[in-house]
Amino acid sequence: MKEATNLSIIRHFKDLSDPRILKKTDHELIDIVVIAICAVICGADKWTQVEAFGRARYDWLKSFLGLRNGIPSHDTFGRLFAIISPVKFQDCFKAWIEEVFTTTSGEIIAVDGKTLRRSFNKQDNKAALHMVHAWATANSILLGQQATEAKSNEITAIPQLLELLALKGCIVTIDAMGCQIKIAKTIRESEGDYVLAVKGNQGELYESIQDTFRLAQTKAFAKMDYDNHQTIDGGHGRVETRTCHVLSATHLYPRQVKWMDLQSIILLESEVVNKNTGECSKESRYYISSLKPDASRIAHAIRQHWAVENNLHWCLDVTFREDECRSRIGDSAENFSLLRRIALMLLRNEKTFKGGLQTKRLQAGWNNDYLLKVLLA
């Protein structure tokens, strides 16, 4: 199959380092990787299903893969993905992403973590794997991920992930866990901007921002470098009003010079009214940013941060059933997680079929021509 021989996944993953000492009876690493990617696209959620897919599609796979020793067993898939270097696997993924996908100027990159709940291993005293993702919200692209064994370790994982990315001209949004001086510095030194949520973990800064806005509101923001933006959304029986207040960081007292290029402090007020009961709930959230006081732009960046939850984490849990996956030996949990993300990127990038992701997976499983479309997307 001439088209399939030029698949970008083959070009970029063929140089993945093989941890085995190869024998004549061994299967080629690129064959194993491509079969696994195709199987996950088509609905496989475990290694036994990957093997079953390979055997069912042997003739089609043989048209563009070597398969000199046939289809590997599920044990072979499991053993190999347990010892493949996740770092080198992700290097191939990153090179593939950079060629196939493009990011928009001014892209908002949402950084957030997700725990693979069934990846813990009690026998080896191994905690569940926690993945930190960098999600380009405008184009729904996963730019990279970093593994850690606990949510609390996001503080060290986030800078490692950011250092792998091209952040120039981008806006990086992170929740309160990532509100750290070192992380802000990493973003600015990479010529990106930051919008960081501030909560009690930054006690002095949090209290200072609260006090500054209380004082400013009593003066109705008179003679202050101030901007605001309001949106009203309705749906599901409720009306939500979001008001974004932005002040220049020069009004913050005491001044926070330790935060590199800090220019704005933000108060986001949210009011939700239930149209049926009339009940009203209010919430206030605080942020800091290296962006100038532009309420519309900052409010958009904050709103877009939730795309990583809606378009990545939710899809991995619901469509790919990630929380049910029990791969846990060696590095298999992290490597299988990357297979799911490769499949998700390919399915999202295929635009000719108008169904949802789950239907696309089924369609790829039923139709070789559509599966090839997904691989070539």
Image: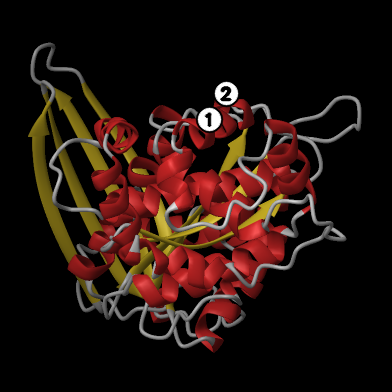
Q: The disc labelled 1 sits on which kind of residue?
A: Asp
Q: The disc labelled 2 sits on which kind of residue?
A: Glu
Q: Write the residue at 68% across / 60% down.
A: 157
| Residue 376 higher or lower than 318, as above or below | below
Please give left or right for residue 170 compared with residue 162 in the image.
left
Counting from the top left corner in percent of width and height, residue 324 is at: 57, 23
Counting from the top left corner in percent of width and height, residue 191 is at: 46, 88
Question: Which comes before the other along the chain, label 2 or label 1?
Answer: 1
- Give whichever of 217, 284 is nearer the camera: 284
Number of numbered markers: 2
Q: Nearer the viewer, mark 2 or mark 1?
A: 1
- Give whichever of 59, 302 is nearer the camera: 59
Circles 2, 1 touching at the beta carbon (< 8 Å)? yes
Say whether residue 321 is visible: yes
* Residue on which disc 2 sits: 324
* Residue on which disc 1 sits: 45
Please give left or right for residue 268 compared with residue 257 in the image.
left
| Residue 346 higher or lower than 325, as above or below | below
Q: Where does the C terminus fall, quadrant-wise?
A: bottom left
| Residue 126 higher or lower than 101, as above or below | above
